[in-house]
Amino acid sequence: ENIVEIHNLQKSFDNGKITALNGINLEIKRGEFVSIIGPSGSGKSTLLNMIGALDKADTGSIVVSGNDLIQKKDLSEFRSREIGFIFQLHNLIPNLSVLENVEIPMYEKNMSSSQMRKRALELLEYVGLSDKLKRKPTELSGGERQRVAIARALANEPSIILADEPTGSLDSKTGAMILNRLKDLHEKENVTLIMVTHDMDVASLADRTIRVLDGKIQN
Ligand code: ADP
Ligand code: ADP
C-alpha cells in the first residue's frame, strides 16, 4: 500500500521564474523509511512541504494517506491528523513550557486534560526530557529543543513523520540519540518516516535513499 503517490508534480515560485519541483514522480509505501538527499536549492524542502500540505503544488497529482492534496480543502485538518513535523525552526511556542508544547497537538483530539498530560509525560520520558518539563524552549539547548519537537510530532500518533535535517545543528552524540528514536518509531510503530538530510551517513540508515537534483528525482 502506497502512503504517498506523486505524479508529475510541478511547483514554481516568483511567478514561474524559479522552478523548485520539475516533474516529481514518487511512491512511498506505508511504514517505509526514506531519506531525501541532494544539493542545497535542489527542491528537497519544497517536496517535504508538498507532502505535509504546507504549500500547494501548481500541477500534477499528490495523494497522501488517501487524501488528494490538490483537491482537498481542509488541509489543516489533514496535517494535524496525519503528519508529524520535525523541522529546523521547531515551531515551538516560546511562552509555553516543554510539557505544554507537547500537549498542543492533542487539543485537536477528543482527549481529557489528564489523558493529554499522561501522554505528554510518556512522550517526554521517551525522548529523555522528564527533568525539563517546566522549562521554556529558550531555556533549552538545540538538541533538547529538537527532542521536544519529536515528542510533539508524535503526540497525535501521525501516520507520517516528516523530518527536515533533524540532526542538522546537533553534536554527534545528540544526533545519534535523535536518529535512534526515529528509527525505533519506524521499526516498532510502523510509522512512515521521510527525512531530508545532507549527511550521507544519516541517509544510509533509511530503507531507501532518494536523490533530488534540479527539482527532479534522479534514478
Ligand atoms: P532544498 O531544500 O533542496 O535546499 P528548496 O526546496 O528549499 O531546496 O528550494 C528549491 C528552490 O526553490 C530554490 O531555488 C529556492 O530558492 C526556491 N524556493 C523555495 N522556497 C521558496 C519560496 N518560498 N519563494 C521563492 N523561492 C523559493
Ligand atoms: P526551509 O527548510 O525551506 O527553510 P522549513 O522546513 O523550516 O523551511 O519550514 C518550511 C515552512 O513550514 C515554514 O514556513 C514553517 O514555518 C512551516 N512549518 C514548519 N513546521 C510546521 C508545522 N508543524 N505546522 C505548520 N507549519 C509548519
Image (cartoon, rainbow, N blue to C red):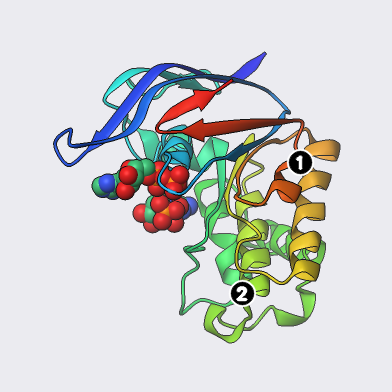
Disc on the earlier residue, 2 or 1? 2
> Above or below — where is 88 with respect to 200?
below
How far is the residue under mark 2 from the one under mark 1? 23 Å
Q: Label 1 is placed on what type of residue?
A: Ser
SS for dot 2: helix
Residue 32, quarter of picture: top right
Position of 174 relative to 164 (above/below): below
Number of the front mark, 2 or 1:
1
Quarter placement of the C terminus: top right
Dot 1 crowding, Cα within 10 Å, few <14, some 14–19, many 20+: few
**74 horizontally vs 183: left or right:** left
Q: Is residue 147 left or right of residue 18?
A: right
Compare residues 170 and 76 and report the one nearer the observer: 170
- Marks counted in the figure total 2
Specify whether residue 72 is in view. no
Taking the image as shown, residue 143 lies to the left or right of residue 13, namely right
Residue drawn 39% across and 25% down?
Answer: 69
Instruction: Point out which mark residue 204 bears.
Output: 1
Residue named by callout 2:
142
Residue found 66% across the figure and 60% down from its top: 167
Q: Give x and y (percent) for residue 94.
A: 46, 77
Q: Say if 165 sits above or below 53 in the image.
A: below
Tag 2: residue type? Gly
Screen quadrant of the N terminus: top right
The answer to whether residue 178 shows anywhere in this view is yes
Question: Residue visible at 54% across and 24% down?
Answer: 218
Label at residue 88: none
Mark 2 crowdedness (10 Å alpha carbons): few <14, some 14-19, many ≥20: some
